[in-house]
Image: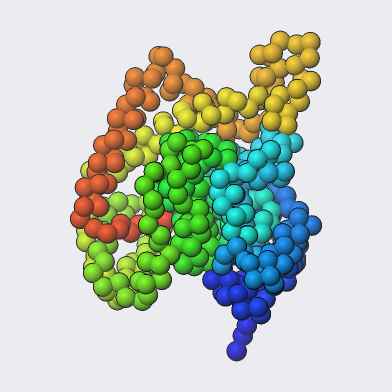
Amino acid sequence: MSVIPLHFQTVAELSAALAAGSLTSVALTEAVIARTLAVEDRVQAFNSHDRESALAQARASDARRAAGRPLGPLDGIPIGLKDLIAVKNQPLTASSKILANFVSPYDATVTTRLRDAGMVFWGRLNMDEFAMGSSTENSATRITANPHDLTRIPGGSSGGSAAALAAGQLPATLGSDTGGSIRQPAALCGVYGLKPTYGRVSRHGLVAYASSLDTVGPLARSPEDCARLHDLLAGPDPDDATTLDAPHAPIAAAVAAAGAALDGLTVGVPRALLEQGLDDDVRARFDATLDALVARGARLVDVTLARPEAALTAYYVIAPAEAASNLARYDGLRYGGDADAAEGRALAQAIAEQRHRGLGAEVKRRILIGTYVLSAAAFAETYARAEHVRRHVRADWARVFAQVDLVATPTSPVPAFPLGARLDD
Protein backbone atom coordinates (compact mmCIF):
# COMPACT_ATOMS: atom_id res chain seq x y z
CA MET A 1 0.00 0.00 0.00
CA SER A 2 1.50 3.30 -1.10
CA VAL A 3 1.64 6.21 1.30
CA ILE A 4 0.89 9.69 -0.04
CA PRO A 5 3.81 12.02 0.77
CA LEU A 6 3.05 14.81 3.21
CA HIS A 7 3.45 17.45 0.53
CA PHE A 8 0.66 15.90 -1.57
CA GLN A 9 -1.89 15.31 1.21
CA THR A 10 -5.06 17.36 1.58
CA VAL A 11 -5.64 19.96 4.26
CA ALA A 12 -8.24 17.65 5.84
CA GLU A 13 -5.74 14.78 6.06
CA LEU A 14 -3.00 16.98 7.48
CA SER A 15 -5.40 18.57 9.97
CA ALA A 16 -6.42 15.13 11.24
CA ALA A 17 -2.78 14.06 11.63
CA LEU A 18 -1.91 17.22 13.54
CA ALA A 19 -4.90 16.75 15.84
CA ALA A 20 -3.97 13.11 16.46
CA GLY A 21 -0.40 14.04 17.35
CA SER A 22 1.09 11.85 14.61
CA LEU A 23 2.42 14.92 12.80
CA THR A 24 3.94 18.22 13.91
CA SER A 25 3.69 21.52 12.14
CA VAL A 26 7.49 21.74 12.05
CA ALA A 27 7.74 18.37 10.26
CA LEU A 28 5.02 19.39 7.81
CA THR A 29 6.54 22.80 7.16
CA GLU A 30 9.99 21.27 6.65
CA ALA A 31 8.42 18.85 4.14
CA VAL A 32 6.89 21.60 2.02
CA ILE A 33 10.07 23.68 2.23
CA ALA A 34 12.14 20.71 1.07
CA ARG A 35 9.71 20.03 -1.75
CA THR A 36 9.80 23.69 -2.78
CA LEU A 37 13.61 23.75 -2.88
CA ALA A 38 13.62 20.49 -4.88
CA VAL A 39 11.31 21.61 -7.70
CA GLU A 40 11.22 25.42 -7.66
CA ASP A 41 14.02 25.87 -10.19
CA ARG A 42 11.74 24.15 -12.75
CA VAL A 43 8.28 25.31 -11.67
CA GLN A 44 9.14 28.93 -10.71
CA ALA A 45 5.96 29.42 -8.67
CA PHE A 46 7.42 31.65 -5.93
CA ASN A 47 8.44 35.29 -6.02
CA SER A 48 9.90 35.05 -2.52
CA HIS A 49 9.84 32.95 0.65
CA ASP A 50 11.23 33.12 4.17
CA ARG A 51 12.28 29.75 5.64
CA GLU A 52 13.08 31.00 9.12
CA SER A 53 9.80 32.86 9.46
CA ALA A 54 7.80 29.81 8.35
CA LEU A 55 9.60 27.52 10.79
CA ALA A 56 9.14 30.00 13.63
CA GLN A 57 5.41 30.03 12.95
CA ALA A 58 5.38 26.21 12.88
CA ARG A 59 7.21 25.98 16.21
CA ALA A 60 4.69 28.36 17.75
CA SER A 61 1.85 26.19 16.44
CA ASP A 62 3.38 23.03 17.92
CA ALA A 63 3.78 24.80 21.26
CA ARG A 64 0.08 25.74 21.25
CA ARG A 65 -0.95 22.16 20.51
CA ALA A 66 1.38 20.80 23.19
CA ALA A 67 -0.28 23.14 25.68
CA GLY A 68 -3.73 22.02 24.54
CA ARG A 69 -4.57 25.41 23.05
CA PRO A 70 -4.63 25.09 19.25
CA LEU A 71 -6.23 28.00 17.43
CA GLY A 72 -8.39 25.65 15.40
CA PRO A 73 -8.25 22.66 13.04
CA LEU A 74 -6.04 24.53 10.54
CA ASP A 75 -3.43 25.55 13.14
CA GLY A 76 0.02 24.66 11.82
CA ILE A 77 -0.90 24.03 8.17
CA PRO A 78 1.22 25.94 5.61
CA ILE A 79 -0.43 28.17 3.04
CA GLY A 80 0.94 30.40 0.27
CA LEU A 81 -0.50 33.72 -0.88
CA LYS A 82 -0.65 35.27 -4.31
CA ASP A 83 1.75 38.22 -4.38
CA LEU A 84 -0.96 40.86 -4.31
CA ILE A 85 -2.35 39.96 -0.86
CA ALA A 86 -0.75 41.99 1.91
CA VAL A 87 1.23 40.24 4.65
CA LYS A 88 2.87 42.55 7.17
CA ASN A 89 6.65 42.84 6.75
CA GLN A 90 6.66 40.69 3.60
CA PRO A 91 7.19 41.81 -0.02
CA LEU A 92 4.08 42.88 -1.92
CA THR A 93 5.05 43.19 -5.58
CA ALA A 94 2.01 42.15 -7.67
CA SER A 95 4.80 40.71 -9.89
CA SER A 96 5.56 44.23 -11.16
CA LYS A 97 8.85 46.12 -11.35
CA ILE A 98 7.11 49.24 -10.07
CA LEU A 99 6.54 47.51 -6.70
CA ALA A 100 9.76 45.51 -6.66
CA ASN A 101 11.00 47.09 -3.41
CA PHE A 102 7.70 47.46 -1.57
CA VAL A 103 7.18 45.70 1.77
CA SER A 104 3.66 45.68 3.18
CA PRO A 105 3.20 47.61 6.45
CA TYR A 106 -0.02 45.74 7.36
CA ASP A 107 -1.99 42.53 6.92
CA ALA A 108 -4.90 42.07 4.55
CA THR A 109 -8.11 41.00 6.29
CA VAL A 110 -7.82 37.50 4.79
CA THR A 111 -4.24 37.34 6.08
CA THR A 112 -5.44 38.25 9.58
CA ARG A 113 -8.06 35.49 9.45
CA LEU A 114 -5.49 32.92 8.36
CA ARG A 115 -3.08 34.14 11.04
CA ASP A 116 -5.80 33.98 13.71
CA ALA A 117 -6.41 30.35 12.65
CA GLY A 118 -2.71 29.56 13.16
CA MET A 119 -1.86 28.84 9.53
CA VAL A 120 1.80 29.05 8.54
CA PHE A 121 2.71 31.49 5.76
CA TRP A 122 5.12 30.00 3.25
CA GLY A 123 5.93 32.21 0.32
CA ARG A 124 4.70 34.87 -2.06
CA LEU A 125 3.35 33.32 -5.26
CA ASN A 126 3.93 34.51 -8.82
CA MET A 127 1.15 35.96 -10.97
CA ASP A 128 0.48 37.97 -14.09
CA GLU A 129 1.50 41.55 -13.34
CA PHE A 130 -1.29 43.28 -11.39
CA ALA A 131 -3.42 40.19 -12.18
CA MET A 132 -3.66 41.17 -15.85
CA GLY A 133 -3.36 37.99 -17.87
CA SER A 134 -4.33 34.34 -18.06
CA SER A 135 -0.99 32.53 -18.42
CA THR A 136 1.36 34.06 -15.78
CA GLU A 137 3.63 34.99 -18.69
CA ASN A 138 2.96 38.68 -18.01
CA SER A 139 4.87 38.52 -14.73
CA ALA A 140 7.86 40.86 -14.43
CA THR A 141 9.64 38.44 -12.08
CA ARG A 142 9.63 34.97 -13.69
CA ILE A 143 7.62 32.66 -15.94
CA THR A 144 5.84 29.90 -14.04
CA ALA A 145 5.48 26.48 -15.67
CA ASN A 146 2.69 23.93 -15.39
CA PRO A 147 4.02 21.15 -13.10
CA HIS A 148 2.29 18.48 -15.21
CA ASP A 149 4.13 19.63 -18.35
CA LEU A 150 6.88 22.20 -17.87
CA THR A 151 6.55 23.34 -21.50
CA ARG A 152 3.00 24.60 -20.88
CA ILE A 153 1.37 27.49 -19.04
CA PRO A 154 -0.16 27.04 -15.57
CA GLY A 155 -2.92 29.53 -16.39
CA GLY A 156 -3.35 32.90 -14.75
CA SER A 157 -3.38 35.29 -13.26
CA SER A 158 -3.05 33.10 -10.14
CA GLY A 159 -0.66 30.76 -11.94
CA GLY A 160 1.86 30.61 -9.11
CA SER A 161 -0.88 29.69 -6.64
CA ALA A 162 -2.13 26.82 -8.83
CA ALA A 163 1.32 25.59 -9.85
CA ALA A 164 2.72 25.54 -6.30
CA LEU A 165 -0.26 23.49 -5.19
CA ALA A 166 -0.05 21.06 -8.12
CA ALA A 167 3.70 20.64 -7.61
CA GLY A 168 3.30 19.73 -3.94
CA GLN A 169 4.99 22.89 -2.70
CA LEU A 170 1.96 23.76 -0.56
CA PRO A 171 -1.25 22.03 0.59
CA ALA A 172 -3.34 25.17 -0.02
CA THR A 173 -2.98 28.63 -1.51
CA LEU A 174 -4.92 31.84 -1.95
CA GLY A 175 -5.48 33.57 -5.27
CA SER A 176 -7.66 36.34 -6.62
CA ASP A 177 -10.25 36.16 -9.38
CA THR A 178 -11.48 39.10 -11.46
CA GLY A 179 -12.36 37.32 -14.70
CA GLY A 180 -11.32 33.70 -14.12
CA SER A 181 -7.96 34.09 -12.38
CA ILE A 182 -8.58 31.40 -9.74
CA ARG A 183 -10.80 29.06 -11.73
CA GLN A 184 -8.80 28.87 -14.97
CA PRO A 185 -5.34 28.11 -13.49
CA ALA A 186 -6.92 25.64 -11.05
CA ALA A 187 -8.44 23.79 -14.00
CA LEU A 188 -5.27 23.88 -16.11
CA CYS A 189 -3.17 22.58 -13.19
CA GLY A 190 -5.65 19.89 -12.14
CA VAL A 191 -6.54 21.29 -8.71
CA TYR A 192 -9.65 22.89 -7.21
CA GLY A 193 -10.32 26.61 -7.07
CA LEU A 194 -13.23 28.61 -5.67
CA LYS A 195 -14.25 32.13 -6.66
CA PRO A 196 -16.52 33.25 -3.81
CA THR A 197 -19.58 35.41 -4.31
CA TYR A 198 -18.55 39.06 -4.60
CA GLY A 199 -18.73 40.67 -1.17
CA ARG A 200 -18.50 37.40 0.74
CA VAL A 201 -14.72 37.70 1.34
CA SER A 202 -13.02 40.98 2.20
CA ARG A 203 -10.81 42.69 -0.39
CA HIS A 204 -9.08 44.88 2.23
CA GLY A 205 -5.34 44.50 1.66
CA LEU A 206 -5.71 43.15 -1.87
CA VAL A 207 -3.88 45.12 -4.57
CA ALA A 208 -6.87 46.25 -6.61
CA TYR A 209 -7.31 45.51 -10.30
CA ALA A 210 -11.04 46.03 -10.95
CA SER A 211 -12.74 46.82 -7.67
CA SER A 212 -16.27 45.83 -8.66
CA LEU A 213 -15.07 42.43 -9.89
CA ASP A 214 -12.11 41.40 -7.70
CA THR A 215 -12.53 38.51 -5.26
CA VAL A 216 -10.13 36.54 -3.02
CA GLY A 217 -10.51 32.77 -2.85
CA PRO A 218 -8.81 29.46 -2.06
CA LEU A 219 -7.13 26.81 -4.19
CA ALA A 220 -6.77 23.32 -2.74
CA ARG A 221 -6.69 19.59 -3.48
CA SER A 222 -10.34 18.87 -2.72
CA PRO A 223 -13.70 20.64 -2.70
CA GLU A 224 -13.84 20.05 1.06
CA ASP A 225 -10.56 21.90 1.56
CA CYS A 226 -11.80 24.83 -0.55
CA ALA A 227 -15.03 24.95 1.44
CA ARG A 228 -13.23 24.93 4.78
CA LEU A 229 -10.92 27.75 3.71
CA HIS A 230 -13.84 29.72 2.31
CA ASP A 231 -15.65 29.50 5.65
CA LEU A 232 -12.54 30.74 7.42
CA LEU A 233 -12.16 33.75 5.10
CA ALA A 234 -15.79 34.76 4.62
CA GLY A 235 -17.70 37.33 6.61
CA PRO A 236 -18.27 41.06 7.02
CA ASP A 237 -15.31 43.40 7.36
CA PRO A 238 -15.56 47.03 8.54
CA ASP A 239 -12.48 47.79 6.45
CA ASP A 240 -14.25 46.77 3.22
CA ALA A 241 -17.58 48.51 2.65
CA THR A 242 -18.42 46.09 -0.18
CA THR A 243 -18.56 43.03 2.07
CA LEU A 244 -22.02 41.64 2.70
CA ASP A 245 -23.45 42.50 6.10
CA ALA A 246 -25.50 39.32 6.36
CA PRO A 247 -23.78 36.43 8.13
CA HIS A 248 -22.65 33.77 5.69
CA ALA A 249 -23.94 30.22 5.82
CA PRO A 250 -20.93 27.89 6.18
CA ILE A 251 -20.54 25.67 3.15
CA ALA A 252 -18.05 23.08 4.47
CA ALA A 253 -20.74 21.11 6.28
CA ALA A 254 -22.97 21.14 3.19
CA VAL A 255 -20.12 19.87 0.99
CA ALA A 256 -19.35 17.08 3.45
CA ALA A 257 -23.04 16.15 3.80
CA ALA A 258 -23.53 15.90 0.03
CA GLY A 259 -21.39 12.77 -0.07
CA ALA A 260 -21.70 10.74 -3.23
CA ALA A 261 -25.42 11.30 -3.79
CA LEU A 262 -26.68 14.32 -5.73
CA ASP A 263 -30.34 13.33 -5.77
CA GLY A 264 -32.58 16.27 -6.64
CA LEU A 265 -29.78 18.55 -7.82
CA THR A 266 -30.66 20.34 -11.08
CA VAL A 267 -27.70 21.21 -13.29
CA GLY A 268 -28.16 23.72 -16.09
CA VAL A 269 -26.22 23.13 -19.31
CA PRO A 270 -25.99 26.08 -21.76
CA ARG A 271 -25.49 23.90 -24.82
CA ALA A 272 -25.64 26.75 -27.32
CA LEU A 273 -22.63 28.29 -25.59
CA LEU A 274 -20.64 25.11 -26.25
CA GLU A 275 -21.24 24.80 -29.98
CA GLN A 276 -18.02 26.44 -31.10
CA GLY A 277 -14.54 27.23 -29.79
CA LEU A 278 -14.38 24.18 -27.52
CA ASP A 279 -11.38 21.84 -27.81
CA ASP A 280 -12.35 18.23 -28.55
CA ASP A 281 -10.56 16.88 -25.46
CA VAL A 282 -12.22 19.49 -23.25
CA ARG A 283 -15.62 18.61 -24.70
CA ALA A 284 -15.03 14.91 -24.06
CA ARG A 285 -14.04 15.55 -20.43
CA PHE A 286 -17.00 17.86 -19.94
CA ASP A 287 -19.46 15.32 -21.36
CA ALA A 288 -17.95 12.64 -19.10
CA THR A 289 -18.44 14.94 -16.13
CA LEU A 290 -22.10 15.47 -17.01
CA ASP A 291 -22.54 11.69 -17.23
CA ALA A 292 -20.94 11.32 -13.80
CA LEU A 293 -23.32 13.90 -12.33
CA VAL A 294 -26.33 12.05 -13.76
CA ALA A 295 -24.99 8.75 -12.39
CA ARG A 296 -24.92 10.33 -8.94
CA GLY A 297 -28.53 11.48 -9.13
CA ALA A 298 -28.36 14.94 -10.68
CA ARG A 299 -30.85 16.03 -13.34
CA LEU A 300 -29.59 17.93 -16.40
CA VAL A 301 -31.63 20.85 -17.69
CA ASP A 302 -30.88 22.73 -20.91
CA VAL A 303 -30.68 26.47 -20.31
CA THR A 304 -30.21 29.41 -22.64
CA LEU A 305 -28.58 32.78 -22.12
CA ALA A 306 -29.95 35.73 -24.03
CA ARG A 307 -26.66 37.36 -25.06
CA PRO A 308 -23.72 35.45 -23.55
CA GLU A 309 -21.18 37.42 -25.57
CA ALA A 310 -22.41 40.66 -23.98
CA ALA A 311 -20.84 39.73 -20.64
CA LEU A 312 -17.36 39.49 -22.13
CA THR A 313 -17.79 42.72 -24.07
CA ALA A 314 -18.85 44.59 -20.94
CA TYR A 315 -16.02 43.03 -18.94
CA TYR A 316 -13.39 44.33 -21.38
CA VAL A 317 -14.70 47.85 -20.85
CA ILE A 318 -15.38 47.81 -17.10
CA ALA A 319 -12.22 46.00 -15.97
CA PRO A 320 -9.70 48.25 -17.81
CA ALA A 321 -11.59 51.36 -16.72
CA GLU A 322 -11.36 50.37 -13.07
CA ALA A 323 -7.74 49.29 -13.55
CA ALA A 324 -6.80 52.68 -14.97
CA SER A 325 -8.30 54.33 -11.91
CA ASN A 326 -6.75 51.93 -9.38
CA LEU A 327 -3.26 51.91 -10.91
CA ALA A 328 -3.03 55.71 -11.06
CA ARG A 329 -1.48 55.59 -7.56
CA TYR A 330 1.62 53.70 -8.79
CA ASP A 331 3.98 56.44 -9.90
CA GLY A 332 7.33 54.75 -9.25
CA LEU A 333 8.09 57.30 -6.53
CA ARG A 334 6.05 55.81 -3.68
CA TYR A 335 5.44 52.21 -2.54
CA GLY A 336 9.10 51.26 -2.56
CA GLY A 337 9.89 53.39 -5.59
CA ASP A 338 12.64 55.90 -6.22
CA ALA A 339 11.50 59.19 -4.67
CA ASP A 340 14.77 60.80 -5.72
CA ALA A 341 13.85 60.31 -9.39
CA ALA A 342 11.89 63.56 -9.35
CA GLU A 343 14.72 65.59 -7.80
CA GLY A 344 15.22 68.77 -9.84
CA ARG A 345 12.88 67.58 -12.60
CA ALA A 346 9.31 68.15 -13.68
CA LEU A 347 7.15 65.79 -11.63
CA ALA A 348 4.98 64.71 -14.56
CA GLN A 349 8.05 63.78 -16.61
CA ALA A 350 9.60 61.83 -13.72
CA ILE A 351 6.39 59.88 -13.15
CA ALA A 352 5.97 59.14 -16.86
CA GLU A 353 9.51 57.76 -17.07
CA GLN A 354 9.10 55.67 -13.92
CA ARG A 355 5.82 54.20 -15.13
CA HIS A 356 7.31 53.51 -18.56
CA ARG A 357 10.13 51.50 -16.96
CA GLY A 358 8.10 49.96 -14.16
CA LEU A 359 4.95 48.71 -15.91
CA GLY A 360 4.73 45.88 -18.42
CA ALA A 361 3.18 46.00 -21.86
CA GLU A 362 -0.12 44.32 -20.89
CA VAL A 363 -0.62 46.63 -17.92
CA LYS A 364 0.09 49.69 -20.07
CA ARG A 365 -2.35 48.42 -22.69
CA ARG A 366 -5.18 48.05 -20.19
CA ILE A 367 -4.46 51.43 -18.58
CA LEU A 368 -4.64 53.07 -22.01
CA ILE A 369 -7.92 51.33 -22.83
CA GLY A 370 -9.36 52.23 -19.43
CA THR A 371 -8.27 55.85 -19.67
CA TYR A 372 -9.93 56.11 -23.06
CA VAL A 373 -13.29 54.59 -22.04
CA LEU A 374 -13.43 56.93 -19.02
CA SER A 375 -12.67 60.01 -21.11
CA ALA A 376 -15.38 62.61 -21.62
CA ALA A 377 -15.47 61.84 -25.33
CA ALA A 378 -16.07 58.09 -24.90
CA PHE A 379 -17.72 57.64 -21.49
CA ALA A 380 -21.36 57.59 -22.56
CA GLU A 381 -20.77 55.19 -25.44
CA THR A 382 -18.40 52.86 -23.57
CA TYR A 383 -18.34 52.72 -19.77
CA ALA A 384 -21.91 53.87 -19.14
CA ARG A 385 -23.22 51.48 -21.77
CA ALA A 386 -21.13 48.61 -20.37
CA GLU A 387 -22.62 49.15 -16.91
CA HIS A 388 -26.08 49.07 -18.49
CA VAL A 389 -25.21 45.77 -20.19
CA ARG A 390 -23.91 44.38 -16.87
CA ARG A 391 -27.32 44.93 -15.27
CA HIS A 392 -28.96 42.99 -18.10
CA VAL A 393 -26.41 40.17 -17.79
CA ARG A 394 -27.12 39.86 -14.06
CA ALA A 395 -30.87 39.75 -14.70
CA ASP A 396 -30.34 37.05 -17.34
CA TRP A 397 -28.35 34.86 -14.93
CA ALA A 398 -30.95 35.44 -12.20
CA ARG A 399 -33.56 34.08 -14.61
CA VAL A 400 -31.41 30.98 -15.25
CA PHE A 401 -30.78 30.35 -11.56
CA ALA A 402 -34.51 30.49 -10.90
CA GLN A 403 -34.67 27.25 -12.93
CA VAL A 404 -31.59 25.34 -11.73
CA ASP A 405 -29.30 24.88 -8.74
CA LEU A 406 -26.08 25.38 -10.68
CA VAL A 407 -24.80 25.83 -14.21
CA ALA A 408 -22.08 23.54 -15.57
CA THR A 409 -19.59 24.74 -18.17
CA PRO A 410 -16.00 23.90 -19.00
CA THR A 411 -13.70 26.19 -17.02
CA SER A 412 -11.45 26.78 -20.03
CA PRO A 413 -12.33 26.08 -23.68
CA VAL A 414 -8.80 24.76 -24.30
CA PRO A 415 -6.20 22.78 -22.33
CA ALA A 416 -3.01 24.44 -21.11
CA PHE A 417 -1.22 25.71 -24.21
CA PRO A 418 2.57 25.86 -24.76
CA LEU A 419 4.53 28.64 -23.14
CA GLY A 420 4.95 31.51 -25.57
CA ALA A 421 2.33 30.22 -28.00
CA ARG A 422 -0.13 33.08 -27.55
CA LEU A 423 1.93 36.02 -26.37
CA ASP A 424 1.22 37.88 -29.62
CA ASP A 425 -2.46 36.92 -29.77
Q: Is residue 161 left or right of residue 402?
A: right
Residue 331 lies, in percent from the top left, at 65, 24
Q: Nearer the viewer, residue 74 or 44?
A: 74
Residue 15 lies, in percent from the top left, at 58, 71
Q: Quadrant of residue 283?
A: bottom left
For the point 53% across and 62% down, the residue is 220
- Direction bottom: furthest residue: 1
When the figure is inspected, residue 412 is found, relative to residue 367, above or below; the finding is below
For the point 29% across and 30% down, the residue is 388
Residue 305 lies, in percent from the top left, at 24, 47
When the figure is inspected, residue 345 is found, relative to residue 255, above or below; the finding is above
Q: Quadrant of residue 303?
A: bottom left
Residue 336 lies, in percent from the top left, at 73, 32
For the point 41% across and 71% down, the residue is 256
Q: Nearer the viewer, residue 201 or 370?
A: 201
Q: Is residue 87 visible?
A: yes
Q: Is residue 419 visible?
A: no
When the figure is inspected, residue 207 is found, relative to residue 408, above or below; the finding is above
Q: Quadrant of the N terminus?
A: bottom right
Count the marks: 0
When the figure is inspected, residue 99 is found, relative to residue 383, above or below; the finding is below
Q: Nearer the viewer, residue 174 or 299?
A: 174
Q: Is residue 194 left or right of residue 40?
A: left
